[in-house]
Image (cartoon, rainbow, N blue to C red):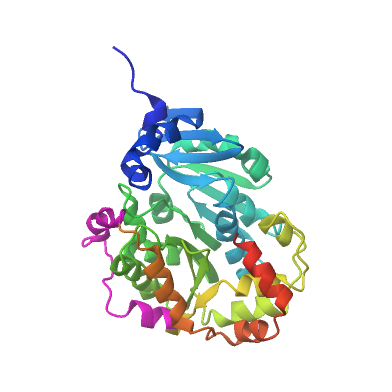
Amino acid sequence: MPSWDPQLLAAGAYKYAPYLGVADLENEFRAWRLLYHEDGSTATVSVREMAGQRSLVIDGKVDASNMGDMLTQRLLGLLPVLLHRQPESVLVLGLGSGVTAASALAPGATQRRDLVEISPEVVQASAFFSKETGSVLSAAGVNLIVADGRSHLAFTTRQYDVIVSEPSNPWMAGIAALFTREFFETARARLKPDGVICQWAHTYDISPGDLKSIVRTFTSVFPESTMWLVGDGDLLLIGTNGAAIESHLAALAADWRSESTSKTLWDVTVSDAQMPFLLMSLLVGGPSEMQRYSSGATVQTDDRMALEFTGPRAIYGRSVADNTAEILRLADGEPSSPAARAILARATDDAWAAAGAMEI
C-alpha cells in the first residue's frame, strides 16, 4: 500500500488553499523542498524550504520561519526580558524554531533558562534553525524540558522572573487551554515578585470577539498589562504581577544599555539612541486601553472554554484589517504611558523611517 504523501500533509491545504487559485495550489505546494517530516503523538511536524526561506510546519500550519516571522519571534523573547531589566530565571513555553528562546537569552543576565516543549519532533525540527538561534539548546544554563507547558507550570516548584508563552493559534486542537483564566493564574503563581509575562496572540484568522476575549482573560489575571502590535498580525500581551507596568516602561526608556539588542532584533545597524523609540513605537495600549478594548468580552475558563469552538469558525474570516484598525484607534496616536509619550515626542523623521523599515 502506498504511503501518504508527506509533502501534501505538510502543505496545510485546509488552511492555505483559500488563498490560492486552483491551478496554483499544487504547484505552490510542490515548490517547497521537504527537509524534515515526522508524525508524533501530539503533532505532525515538518520543516520545508524554498529559495532560502525555511518554515516550521505543525499539523499543516506554519508556526515559525526564518523570514517574515523573525521580528515577532525575537521580540517575544527579548521585550519581556528588557522590561524586567535583570531577570535571573526565564521560562519559555513552546520551543518552535528556537528563535524566541535564543532572543530571551541575548542580554546575557539570566542564570537559569527553562525551555518547555511538548513535542519531541519540534525539538528535532528546531535544529534546522540553528543558524538563526545559535544552537540555543546547547547554550550554557539552558534546560530543555520535553513536557506539556501547562503541566510544568502546575507542578514545578520553581519561580521565574520572566515567563514567555508562545503557543500555536487558539483554533488548533488543545491550544485554547493555554488562553484560559486558570492558565494565566497558574503562570502568575510561578512568577517572582514584580515578574513579567509575555503572551503571544494574533489579529489574523480570529474574530474580534475572540481576540477581545483573550485580552480580557489575560487582564483579569494581569491588570497591569500592555499590548504591543508587531506588523499588522501579531499582538504581544505583556503584564506584571507587580504594582505597576509603567515602572517597567519607564526603566526601559531611561536606562538603555543593551549593546546586543540591536543585533538580536535586526540585521541592520541601529543606534542606541533609536532603540527605545523603535520598541515604544510598537506599544498600542496600557491597562486603560486594554480594559476599554475588552470590556464586556467573555473570560475564557477551563469549564467554559468557548474559544475551543469559536476559534476554528474564524480562520477564513480575513479579519486582520478590522482587528488591527480597532486596536490602533485605542490610543488615537498617543499612548497613555508617560514614558512612551516622552520618547515618541522626541522622535525624529529618521527614527520614524527606521520604525517603518523595521517591520518590512
Judging depth in this view, the residue of 299 and 195 nearest the camera is: 299
In the image, is residue 285 above or below residue 232?
below
Image quadrant in which you'd find residue 40: top left
| Above or below, comparing residue 96 to residue 29 in the picture | below
Q: Quadrant of the N terminus?
A: top left
> Which region of the structure is painted magenta?
289-316
Q: Position of residue 49 (x, y in %)?
A: 55, 34
356 vs 85, nearest the viewer = 356
Q: Is residue 8 left or right of residue 239?
A: left
Whole-percent x and y of residue 71? Answer: 59, 57
Please name the residue shown 33% across and 48% down the image: 172
Q: Is residue 334 above or below residue 222?
A: below
Residue 326, x across and y down, in percent:
40, 75
- Residue 327 shows in this picture: yes
Residue 6 is a magenta residue? no
Q: Residue furthest top?
A: 1
Would you say 147 lies left or right of 260 here? left
Position of residue 198 relative to residue 8, above or below, is below
Which corner quadrant of the image does residue 347 belong to?
A: bottom right
State the residue lying farthest toward the front.
Answer: 23
Rendered residue at 48%/83% (across/down): 331
**Residue 138 seen anywhere in this rendered image of the structure:** no
Q: Residue at x 75, y 64 (%)?
A: 270
- Residue 284 or residue 20, whichever sits in front: 20
Q: Residue 103 in the image: x percent, y percent?
A: 63, 54
